[in-house]
Amino acid sequence: MHRVRAMEVDGRSLAVAALHDVVRHHHDDYRKVMKVLRLVAGCDRVRNENHVKRGAKWPDIYEIRGGMVRLFFFYTPDLEEIVVCTNAYWKTKPGRKEQDTAFAICARFRDLYLRHGAER
């Protein structure tokens, strides 16, 4: 089992803010994302790409798939936690560029997390 953390930068979490918006405006997608998040937290690794997709260019970054909402995370080096670190990406956006950007943002947050440690 993994603990789930939402990364904060300067006291703000993009993931938490995005989830608050999703729960208010897209409740069905919120339920789907939370179901997958519980699945990820409750097992070693989710390999079903209907639920979680590993980044092709960013192999340490994972995408939670819930309805039309995507949420990005990474595992901590000790594999005890997953850190949800980016805003939600909406699958309805055209093109691959937005999705690649979301993966890249999560990769930068992961690098920041690793450089500065898991400050609690």
Image (cartoon, rainbow, N blue to C red):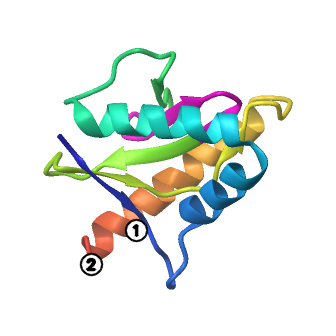
Indicate which disc, 2 or 1, sits on the residue closer to the N terminus: 1
Look at label 1 and name its amino acid: Leu
Numbered range of the magenta stretch: 58-70
Look at the image and say whether residue 89 sits in the magenta stretch. Answer: no
Count the labels in the image: 2
Q: Is mark 1 on a helix, strand or loop?
A: helix
According to the picture, the residue beneath numbered tag 2 turns out to be 119
Mark 2: secondary structure: loop
- Dividing the picture into quadrants, the one containing residue 1 is top left
**Residue of label 1:** 112
Q: Could you say where residue 115 lies in the image, as x and y percent from the top left?
A: 31, 71
Q: Picture coordinates of residue 119 (x, y %)?
A: 26, 78
Q: Identify residue type, mark 2.
A: Glu
Q: Which residue is pictured at 43% across the width and 41% down the height?
A: 61
* Quarter of the figure with the C terminus: bottom left
Residue 15 pos. (x, y %): 56, 59
Left or right of residue 1: residue 84 = right
> Toward the viewer: 31 or 116?
31
Among the 4 quarters of the image, the one containing residue 17: bottom right
